[in-house]
Image (tube, rainbow, N blue to C red):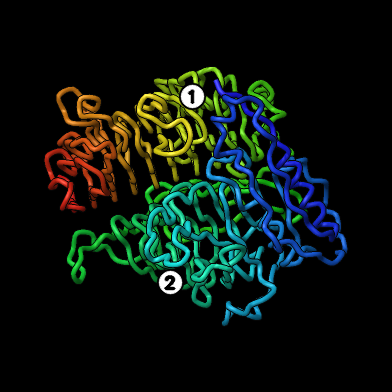
């Protein structure tokens, strides 16, 4: 079992924020404390990498007039949550964001930044960003969530850019280094803001011969891959979601947002957009799916498009959806959490916070938990007492699962709050109840092995409410990466009428604790309940069937999967006498199931001719249907023999992609 070390970084971030609020100059954050033991040091080598100060990034600032007090004092959210208001200058905001946006990929530090309602930055230079001054302009880093506190996105108006750039591997010729690009730009988010895009390169990037952060006027870049959602955003211009020089990017998520201009996808390999409005969409590589998106491009999947073939699938409305709960400042100046209602057959944005759109829950009805202070016992006591739960940023060591046994409980994670088991337990178990909302949490497997990390309803669960489905939103799982971990199943869904909205279950292919016998995980998602819907399902690298669907009347809109890279040989990866394990397996006795927009990707990196017989395995039943299926050979050896069952040609050396427009 790995034991967490403590750090001073959270307190240091809070001190920086306090200094800025007082108008003082900012100094660099201290390096995190050294690991307590040699073994711990090996496990945390990447996470604890010292981050040097960045010369010239902090500037003295003028004193500010304190903002009037709010209606009541906010609860203590701890040192990893920062509230920015209009008394902060753009320089102060940028200086502060530059202290929290440089976490290492597997850091243990987490950050939530909130903007109070107001206008930030100057629009004067919007037509010539190269010379623009006074803008809010910062990179969004690992484990950093930035959100507005308005009831409407445009209650927080930012002149500038909150952007994500790819890794710059070749500063003198970045066009020669597409890999890794944005392939590891994970675990960050922006939400509930209006942005007038004015972007300039920042920090070290600005000094490069070919800065990555340059964009066209009125354009912002958000070049990300998994676990990096944009929600409830109003981008008042263009958005590019790939690197300036065509660097690789692999799979993002946009929901309940409006982009008035063009979204340029470029090298973005796959992307899911749900219930949004776009001015136009440009490009796509393998699998671009739109559900309930006004202005979406027409479906052209499998059709000739110039010298290429279409990769776009548009669905007019989303069959089941619920937007993410979010913290906001109500009319009385109090903090509340708005919990949107579920909707059926919906399209376009819905930013209403009226009583017909959902319910508002005062922050006093939430238990505000803090990592390092709270444990499973204290949090479960609050849940048993009828409280909802806010998990402030941090890593929570749990010797028992968080037990959510009350219908309609809300669990809201801030700043990628992470849960890890210490005794082979699950980290979260939902009882046989309806209407639970879980949002914004990450589960990290540990040792000893857990049978399941997140369980939605006990086995055999029957209680549900189709009008108020239990919903998991922006829930991410890692088996390996920050440290060695083992879990047989990452997420098990037993409750009927559950909604999974943006899930990434990841058995790590890089980082700490990585190896075929080290970070073991059989299944990413197992669905046993009936009428379960998944909108944006990402499951990667598990060692057996990565997604298993046993329930009836299930439906998936957008599926991304990479089969495991590190299979040592074919004998180690056989489903009986069948080559490999399906990436998406629908049980033989299921009579009704649908999936639209699936991608299965092959990259065996052990130099062995390893084969997967079919990316998708499903029964041949009239009610089991698939549309817009893709298999891709990324690199390495071996490949996939068929896209689904015996249909679709092989992808392997010399054949990169195969499409199946519909099945059967």
Q: Is residue 189 left or right of residue 600?
A: right
Give the residue displayed 77% in from the left and 54% down from the top. Answer: 27
Q: Name the image quarter holding the C terminus.
A: top left
Measuring from the top left, give residue 467's x and y in whole percent. Answer: 46, 41
Can residue 109 be seen here? yes
Q: Position of residue 618 (x, y in %)?
A: 20, 35
Mark 2 or mark 1: whose residue is earlier in sequence: 2
Q: Look at 19% across and 40% down and name the residue there.
A: 638
Indicate which disc residue 341 carries. Answer: none
Q: Nearer the viewer, residue 243 or 317?
A: 243
According to the picture, the residue beneath numbered tag 2 turns out to be: 262
Q: Secondary structure at mark 2?
A: strand
**Image quarter in which the N terminus is found:** top right
Viewer-side residue, 434 vs 178:
178
> Could one spot residue 412 in this view of the protein?
no
Position of residue 542 relative to residue 167, above or below, is: above
Q: Secondary structure at mark 1?
A: loop
In the rendered image, which residue does mark 1 sit on?
432
């Amino acid at each position: 079992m790995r034991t967490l070390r403590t750090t001073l970084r959270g307190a240091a971030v809070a001190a920086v924020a306090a200094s800025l609020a007082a108008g003082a100059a900012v100094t660099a954050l201290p390096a995190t404390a050294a690991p307590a033991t040699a073994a711990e040091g090996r496990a945390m080598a990447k996470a604890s990498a010292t981050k040097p100060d960045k010369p010239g990034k902090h500037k003295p600032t003028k004193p500010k007039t304190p903002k009037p007090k709010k209606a009541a004092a906010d609860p203590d959210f701890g040192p990893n949550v920062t509230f920015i208001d209009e008394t902060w200058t753009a320089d102060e905001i940028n200086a502060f964001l530059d202290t929290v946006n440089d976490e290492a990929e597997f850091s243990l530090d987490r950050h939530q930044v909130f903007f109070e309602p107001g206008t930030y930055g100057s629009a004067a230079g919007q037509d010539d960003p190269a010379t623009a001054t006074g803008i809010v302009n910062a990179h969004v880093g690992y484990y950093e969530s930035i959100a507005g506190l308005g009831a409407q996105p445009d209650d927080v108006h930012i002149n500038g850019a909150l952007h994500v750039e790819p890794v710059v591997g070749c500063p003198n010729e970045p066009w020669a280094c597409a890999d890794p690009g944005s392939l590891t730009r994970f675990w960050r988010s922006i939400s509930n803001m209006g942005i007038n895009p004015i972007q300039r390169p920042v920090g070290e990037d600005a000094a490069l011969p070919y800065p990555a952060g340059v964009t066209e006027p009125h354009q912002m870049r958000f070049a990300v891959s998994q676990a990096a959602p944009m929600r409830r955003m109003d981008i008042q211009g263009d958005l590019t979601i790939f690197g300036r020089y065509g660097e690789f990017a692999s799979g993002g998520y946009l929901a309940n947002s409006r982009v008035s201009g063009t979204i340029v996808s470029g090298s973005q390999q796959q992307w899911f957009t749900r219930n949004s409005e776009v001015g136009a969409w440009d490009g796509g590589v393998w699998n671009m799916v739109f559900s309930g998106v006004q202005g979406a491009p027409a479906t052209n999947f499998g059709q000739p498009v110039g010298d290429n073939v279409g990769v776009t699938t548009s669905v007019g409305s989303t069959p089941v959806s619920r937007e993410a709960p979010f913290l906001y400042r109500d009319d009385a100046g109090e903090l509340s959490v708005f919990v949107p209602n579920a909707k059926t057959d919906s399209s376009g944005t819905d930013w209403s916070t009226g009583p017909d759109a959902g319910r508002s829950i005062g922050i006093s009805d939430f238990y505000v938990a803090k990592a390092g202070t709270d444990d499973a016992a204290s949090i479960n006591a609050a849940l048993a007492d009828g409280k909802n739960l806010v998990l402030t940023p941090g890593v929570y060591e749990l010797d028992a699962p968080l037990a959510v046994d009350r219908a309609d409980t809300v669990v809201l994670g801030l700043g990628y709050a992470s849960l890890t088991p210490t005794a082979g337990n699950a980290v979260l178990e939902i009882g046989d109840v309806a209407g639970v909302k879980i949002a914004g949490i990450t589960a990290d497997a540990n040792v000893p092995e857990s049978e399941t990390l997140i369980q939605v309803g006990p086995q055999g669960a029957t209680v549900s409410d189709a009008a108020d489905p239990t919903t998991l939103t922006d829930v991410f799982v890692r088996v390996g990466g920050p440290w060695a971990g083992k879990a047989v199943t990452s997420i098990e869904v037993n409750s009927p009428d559950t909604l999974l909205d943006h899930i990434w279950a990841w058995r790590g292919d890089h980082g700490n604790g990585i190896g075929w016998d080290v970070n073991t995980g059989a299944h990413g998602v197992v669905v046993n309940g009936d009428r379960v819907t998944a909108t944006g399902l990402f499951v990667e690298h598990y060692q057996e069937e990565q997604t298993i669907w046993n329930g009836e009347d299930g439906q998936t809109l957008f599926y991304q999967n990479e089969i495991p890279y590190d299979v040592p040989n074919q004998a180690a990866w056989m489903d009986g006498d069948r080559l490999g394990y399906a990436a998406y397996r629908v049980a033989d006795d299921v009579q009704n199931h649908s999936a639209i927009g699936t991608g299965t990707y092959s990259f065996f990196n052990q130099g062995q001719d390893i084969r997967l017989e079919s990316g998708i395995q499903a029964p041949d039943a009239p009610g089991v249907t698939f549309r817009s299926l893709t298999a891709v050979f990324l690199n390495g050896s071996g490949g996939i023999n068929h896209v689904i069952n015996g249909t679709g040609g092989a992808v392997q050396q010399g054949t990169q992609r195969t499409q199946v427009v519909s099945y059967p």
